[in-house]
Image (cartoon, coloured by chain):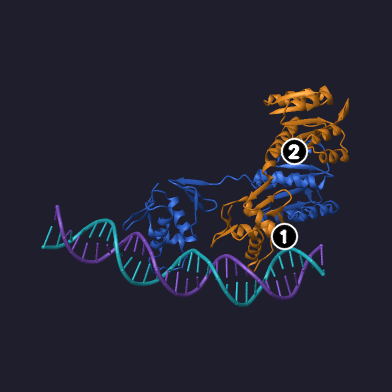
Chain colours: A blue, B orange, C purple, D cyan
Amino acid sequence: MRILLIEDEAALARPLKEHLEADLNMVEWFPTLDEADAAIRTTEYDVVLLDLQLPDGDGLTFLSTVRDRALRTPIIILTARDKVSDRIDGLNRGADDYVIKPFDLDEVKARIHTVCRRSADQIAQTVQIRDLWINLSDHSVTRNGQPVRLTAKEWGLFEVLLRRKSQIVPKDSLETAIYAYGEEIESNALEAHISRLRTKLGKDLITTHRGLGYTLTP
Amino acid sequence: MRILLIEDEAALARPLKEHLEADLNMVEWFPTLDEADAAIRTTEYDVVLLDLQLPDGDGLTFLSTVRDRALRTPIIILTARDKVSDRIDGLNRGADDYVIKPFDLDEVKARIHTVCRRSADQIAQTVQIRDLWINLSDHSVTRNGQPVRLTAKEWGLFEVLLRRKSQIVPKDSLETAIYAYGEEIESNALEAHISRLRTKLGKDLITTHRGLGYTLTP
DNA sequence: CACCCGAAGCTTACGCGAAGCTTACGGATG
DNA sequence: CATCCGTAAGCTTCGCGTAAGCTTCGGGTG
């Protein structure tokens, strides 16, 4: 698990960092919003622990700007102010949970865990054709429930045909989709790949149109 | 949702009860521990809202006795005392969350939701794959009953693969998962870790997809 | 209308080279 | 001083381009 800790009090941050690291997490700790902002722009964290009172600004506005950028990373607020308004405000601005200082270290751990579980329910983009289930996001294919292993080139071809489903895709389109500029093919490599695809995914999934190209037929 | 509310101040309990009932919940309100104890012995609630200061005893001892009976019902503490010791004590005795008075009604609602979701998830907090028992909350792994010691990087990789079980995870996803921004890897460190994971967890647990990534196969 | 022939496409085996695996080593860390 | 981890070297594996031999298609000719 990758954790971003934004907290200016070293006395609080250090033991928390160590406690979480002892649990085999990777913790990156920054005491200012500026540094944290640079970090969150470039790295994908599993969860952010955010203090509200920081030397260079208010954590709540940071929270808002992060959410405005459509970042879905779970954020847990750490705050010494135990006023209701702050908590509600934080939740309204897109925080996922909050912990009130001083907090128990194991309590923070538990909160991190539940929040991450919640966000882990990602919706996979899947397509179904005949007996095939295709997951576009992770490039996996199952046939009658059995996983089918496609190679990189095979998937490349398949994906192009899939996106232009039931349209005739010319050979050149397929070639440019699979081969980098400058890469030459002096043989029937393309047809060889089509052949391998057919044996893996079904004999009549891909129809040939002589002199024109190929079609994926649902 | 079936909710047990234990609170002696009618001025606080009544609006809360009404607010929750407006959300189509069933709320049973008791002002004393005796009545509440009788209720919890006979009825299965989804969540308990527990005040700590009650006319006929301390809410904390009630909490302990309930937990001693091995009841897993989620309990949220309502307390006017905002002393740290009370909150920590409550959590240690098995409370799932706490709300400090005066609280916002919607906040309590949100807390109830998260706590219920958490308790529903708790069954799945340990995962079993083949001869491996994986505890997601404390990051421990046993193989055939023998504990397996994973390093931070190893667990990091394993966790990512676990969350996307039986899906192809690209190498760069794995790299960004365990390396901080700016950290460069100019070698096959990733593959080395995968190799070490395989020797620790089983030869064929992780499958390679050339040019694409890795898969954890149950 | 049947036949034929060449072009287009299909399939399979093979070998090369890149991608991945394993292991030892040494620096860093705490 | 024990552990973790990145590096690099040597090894193994497997994807993929190549090419040979085959099948299929279609149109032109008798």
Neighbor class of circle 2 (other Cα within 10 Å; few <14, some 14-19, many 20+) is few
- Label 2 chain ID: A
Q: Quadrant of residue B60?
A: top right
Residue for point 71% across, 43% down: A114
Counting from the top left corner in percent of width and height, residue B140 is at 72, 53
Q: Nearer the viewer, residue B65 or A126?
A: B65
Q: Nearer the viewer, residue A49 or C20?
A: C20
Counting from the top left corner in percent of width and height, residue A49 is at 75, 48
Q: Which mark is residue A89?
A: 2
**Kind of residue sitting beneath label 2:** Asp
Judged from the image, the secondary structure of the residue bearing numbered disc 2 is helix
Relative vertical location of residue B97 with respect to residue A106 in this rendering, above or below: above
| Residue B180 in view here | no
Relative vertical location of residue C24 with respect to residue C19 in this rendering, above or below: below
Residue designated by label 1? B151
Relative placement, left or right, of B33 versus B44 is right
**Kind of residue sitting beneath label 1:** Thr
Counting from the top left corner in percent of width and height, residue B18 is at 73, 23
